[in-house]
Image (cartoon, helix red, strand yellow):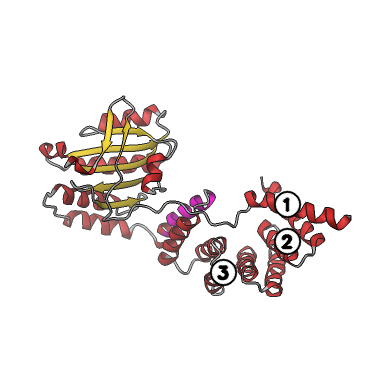
Amino acid sequence: MKTTRSIVLAAVVVLIFSTVISEGVSTPPRRIPEGALVPEFSAVDTTGKPFVCRRSSGQVLILAFLSSEKKRSLEAVEDIFGALSSIPPERLTSLEIAFIMQNVDNRQFIESIQEKAPTVVHILDDDQYDIWGRLGVIATPTVLICDRGGKVLCVKPGHAYDFAPVVKSRLFQALEIPYDDGADKAATVRTVANSTVSARAKRHLQMAQLLARKDKISSAIEQAQMAYEIDPNSPKVALELGELLCRAGQAQKAIKLVSSVAAQNNRDKARVNLALGWANRQIGKLEKAEEFLQQGIGQDPTLPRLYFELGRIYQQRKDSEKAMQAYFRALQLIYQED
């Protein structure tokens, strides 16, 4: 009877962890690639005017995905308006521009856009992520530029050092305006010189963490991989990527990556052992996995996932008592953190 109760309790705990610490892989829509045709859609902007995105309009299309609560979105708007201001006024009529936004109730942000806009800009409320989902956009800000036939020329996510020159050059290309990028290249070089490797990697890593919290694991891995390519010597970046690979079930890749991490402190050492234990459990090497996890607990006993993975091992071995104890300890640590 006691064993039955333990098994039931362990099963309940696993169900709880399915929401608290998820290992499943979500399948978010892929971001629309350059060269594809933009999906057609219609909407009503915040002033009640209709906006129609259609490929046969003959207009160059700019879609900017923004959040009124993000500083980077405001910076992106300023860069977009800077590019628009350099276009001859008679050519601005060839543009259709829509800012697709969350949080349109932020009147100060909306009024700032309307005051500074050099031409008509439609502001679309997309709090339900309908348009975002159609184009597979997840990063804020993201700018998409299409030519007159609706072909995507540019998808620029995030507000990095090259945001302004990329948007401007693609916009001029779409409008068939000659573009001398010498000055922008010089500015870009100066910006890159002032932007350290670690700072650029950190931006991608923060985006990866945000996406992971939303269970967009594939996209999170892409961002973490970018961070790793920029700064492969960072233990923090490698460990974050390793854990994301585990969440995606890519055990062999995770093992290869974290095995080379030169951890300097007990926390990082514990995370190395966590990833190795996690990955080895996924490929069925339970004894080896348990060794790694126990080492990790010895190095940092405050990581909930160490105990969760240990519980998974005990559960696979049908040791319900130990599984229950491990899961319970993991839950204690999670609620302690909260």
- For residue 198, say whether it is visible: no
Bounds of the magenta segment: 201-213
Type of the residue with mark 1: Val
For the N terminus, the image quarter is bottom right
Are circles 1 and 2 on residues that touch, CB within 8 Å?
Answer: yes
The stretch drawn in magenta includes residue 204:
yes
Separation (CA) of disc 3 from disc 2: 18 Å
Q: Earlier in the sequence, mark 1 or mark 2?
A: 1
Identify residue for label 1: 13
Q: Is residue 253 depicted above or below 60 in this figure?
A: below
Tags 3 and 2 in contact by the CB under 8 Å rule?
A: no
> Is residue 11 shown left or right of residue 283?
right
- Label ID, residue 316: none
> Does residue 208 belong to the magenta stretch?
yes
Say which residue appears at 50% left-offset and 56% top-offset.
Answer: 217
Q: Name the residue nearer the viewer: 141 or 38.
A: 38
Residue that label 2 marks: 311
Residue 144: image location, x then y, percent: 29, 47
Name the amino acid, label 2: Gly
Question: Foreground: 83 or 254?
Answer: 254
Q: CA distance from mark 1 to mark 2?
A: 10 Å
Secondary-structure class at tag 2: helix
Task: Kindly identify the amino acid type of the residue bearing the numbered disc 3.
Answer: Ala
- Residue bearing mark 3: 251
Q: Secondary structure at mark 3?
A: helix
